[in-house]
């Protein structure tokens, strides 16, 4: 799937790529509606109906990933709620083996995420994956989400890389499309970002079900 001889820089997404998206799905689809319903004194079904379009309307925007934004909009301590169910944060199968190998190789390895610093901090604390990266970049620092072309320009200025020998692995097709438009040559998607959901059919990009598929030749 990938010729590692051609890769000098590896860009890795966090949620749904290295970490099980089940945590985030459960958090936003079940736990936040529950807490919102409690706070507003309404039924959970009603809370879900109210929240779903609000979440939908913010997709792909930096605010969607901003815990402060949602804390204010929903009058809930979102970072605190995440910490409450932090036990559900889990690394996807074979990710650590892969990270150990790629970290030992001469390649530059960067975590590039749309996650907010509080969420990122909590997840690194729970998983200890930070040790594998040369740098960790949150789009909140750059001011644009990964779905936006400007993110890649700013990233390249911060951590120089060449488009032709850079690999991005990300479960978001919107992000992969934006990286493709910017010119990053090697793009791989993830077909099983949430272990509690069935495998996704991905046609626009080569996809892995788990990281064992990328270990050969590394
Ligand atoms: Mg992701």
Image: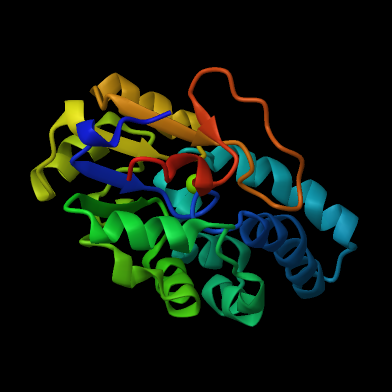
Residue at (60% x, 69% y) in the render: 89
How many discs mark residues in the rendered view? 0
Question: Which part of the image, by quadrant, shows the C terminus?
Answer: top left
Residue at (61% x, 46% y) in the render: 193
Q: Nearer the viewer, residue 198 or 144?
A: 198
* In the image, residue 173 above or below residue 13: above
Residue at (76% x, 46% y) in the render: 197
Q: Where is residue 39 in the image (x, y as percent from the top left)?
A: 75, 74
> Is 105 left, or right, of 52 in this rendering?
left
Q: Where is residue 160 in the image (x, y as percent from the top left)?
A: 9, 43
Q: Which of 102 and 184 is in front in this view?
A: 102
Q: Position of residue 91 (x, y in %)?
A: 55, 64
Q: Where is residue 204 in the image (x, y as percent from the top left)?
A: 51, 18
Q: Which of 116 and 201 is in front in this view?
A: 201
* In the image, residue 205 above or below residue 218: above
Let me know if residue 131 appears in the view. yes
């Amino acid at each position: 799937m990938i010729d590692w001889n051609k890769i000098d820089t590896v860009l890795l997404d966090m949620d749904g790529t290295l970490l099980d998206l089940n945590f985030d799905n459960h958090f936003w689809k079940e736990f936040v509606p529950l807490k919102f319903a409690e706070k507003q004194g309404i039924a959970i079904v009603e809370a879900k109906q109210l929240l779903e379009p609000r979440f939908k309307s913010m997709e792909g925007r930096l605010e969607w990933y901003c815990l402060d934004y949602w804390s204010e909009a929903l009058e809930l301590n979102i970072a605190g709620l995440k910490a409450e169910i932090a036990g559900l944060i889990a690394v996807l199968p074979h990710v650590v083996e892969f990270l150990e190998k790629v970290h030992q190789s001469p390649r530059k390895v960067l975590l590039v995420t749309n996650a907010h610093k509080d969420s990122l901090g909590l997840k690194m604390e729970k998983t200890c994956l930070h040790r594998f990266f040369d740098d960790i970049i949150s789009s909140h620092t750059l001011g644009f989400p990964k779905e936006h072309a400007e993110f890649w320009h700013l990233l390249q200025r911060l951590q120089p890389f060449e488009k032709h020998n850079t690999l991005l692995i990300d479960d978001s097709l919107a992000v992969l499309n934006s990286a493709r438009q910017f010119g990053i040559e090697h793009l791989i998607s993830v077909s099983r970002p949430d272990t509690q959901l069935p495998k996704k059919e991905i046609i626009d990009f080569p996809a892995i079900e788990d990281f064992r598929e990328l270990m050969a030749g590394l």
